[in-house]
Image: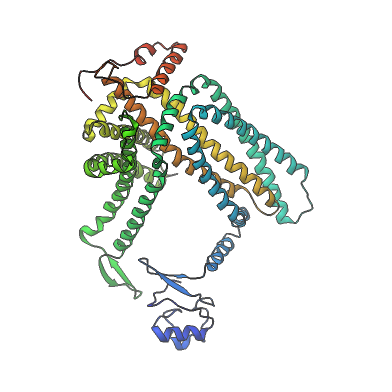
Amino acid sequence: MALCVSECPQQELKTLKDLKKFAETNGSHLCDYALTPSQYTTDISSCPKLPVPESAPIPFFHRCAPVNISCYAKFAEALITFVSDNSVLHRLISGVMTSKEIIIGLCFLSLVLSMILMVVIRFISRILVWILTILVILGSLGGTGVLWWMYAEHRKSFNENLPPDQLQVSKDNQQALLIYAIAATIFTVILLLIMLIMRKRVGLTIALFNVAGKVFIHLPLLVFQPFWTFFALLLFWVYWVMVLLFLGTAGDPFINEQGFVEFKINGPLQYMWWYHVVGLIWISEFILACQQMTIAGAVVTYYFTRNKRDLPFTPILASVNRLLRYHLGTVAKGAFIITLVKIPRMILMYIHSQLKGKENACARCMLKSCICCLWCLEKCLTYLNQNAYTATAINSTNFCTSAKDALVILVENALRVATINTVGDFVLFLGKILIVSATGLAGIMLLNYQRDYTVWVLPLIIVCLFAFLVAHCFLSIFEMVVDVLFLCFAIDTKYNDGSPGKEFFMDKVLMEFVENSRRAMKETGSGAEGRELKPMASGTSSA
């Protein structure tokens, strides 16, 4: 039952007499509206369950929330009781509640591992690729072996004389371990085959990672970009929810048939919901684009500064200053283009979910095709936008001009882009796998001590998902730096040839990377290699 009160109970109400006194004191009836305070002693079924805990109002939301946090544990117990008819769901939820300390500790471990990996990228970038490759191989083989060993150990020590609840939990854990072991074996075999195929190209990323490592040495604040972006998104989402609540109570009040006050929105105000939803997508994309523009500006400053001692004291803040003064329109336009593609895709996904099981096969195929095409278009535009922001940071041109220049550069260096993105993204993906595998393996070891009274499935999934998200946030910054460096290098080689007056800005290690990639591409016998990987001649226009 939801009731409106003029004041939240500031002390615990233990008896019906306390409820009556509270109602008489401030006019807030905690029992059914049909009862007067004098009837509180006769009809207990229409009153809240005693005792009523001490509460405090939540700002802006106008709700009373218990002050004692132990009340929320009772809510979890009520949730478990609600789903008690489903034994599997019951065991999953109880497993999460039992292992909550382990889950929190493992989430913190994934954050620490991601930070350590960023530090490793900074200081040992030359040997990072091979270290990471070896660790992933050993981790995959070791993790698979541990899973099979634990499955054999569980099967050997299985006791059929346990109580029914513990017996079912033990069977579930044994079956889960078998599934994990088989999945890990298949994943390990596929991973080893991929690494065998790409073994000659993995070494090509070493030089590029070395230069990116130098960027993080000179610009250490880049590591903290995910935190600032998440904080800005969090503030905006809180503001968006507040405005949404205000929109929900906007309009003309009237009393309905039950005697309650409702708000009816008329006129143009009723369409503000759509405007508000579009604003959510656009501003969220705008904040993410601001992060990309800030990183691009800082890396461009680093690349095109010949003497690194002449770098600004804080290139990140200098990049933010240029963004706020000159490039907000560019970022807003890029975010708006992504919004124009994302909104139709979301509408089609909503229609598909509503018509699920009702539409014919042809309509279902068309809807899925449209959703897939819009998703691919969104990803392509996102990648083009990121390079357009880099071109804007280099040439200070508008969004359309920068997007055109970036597209021309990417097309002229198609095979280079494919090689760098494929190998570089694969290595960063290995880093994500390493963090998730290490966190998951630690989770298996810790949860092994609770195998007789908790189910591992849901806690382990929660931990691995969180570890992947954390690793993705940190390593995505490194990926952005690599992409920006490559575009800077491509523009550098297009408009400079190393002659007097047209000296290269690039690091020598980056040029060695291109020469190594050229030789590797020749070994593959690609007919298009000579056309794509030769150094570009200097253009007639200036950058």
Q: Quadrant of the C terminus?
A: top left
Residue nearest the viewer, comparing 217 with 254: 217
Specify whether 322 is left or right of 91.
Answer: left
Q: Is residue 454 visible?
A: yes
Residue nearest the viewer, comparing 273 with 254: 273
Which quadrant would residue 332 be assigned to in this image? top left
Location of residue 108 with respect to 322 vertically, above or below: below
Give the percent coordinates (x, y) of residue 9: 45, 77
Which quadrant would residue 248 be assigned to in this image? bottom left
Please report the residue visible at 78 percent of the width from the left and 49 percent of the height from the top: 159
Report how many numbered discs are placed on residues in the image.
0
**Residue at the front extreme of this rendering:** 309
Q: Is residue 332 visible?
A: no
Residue nearest the viewer, comparing 406 with 148: 406
Please report the residue visible at 61 percent of the width from the left and 35 percent of the height from the top: 183
Residue nearest the viewer, comparing 524 with 295: 295
Give the percent coordinates (x, y) of residue 186: 61, 31
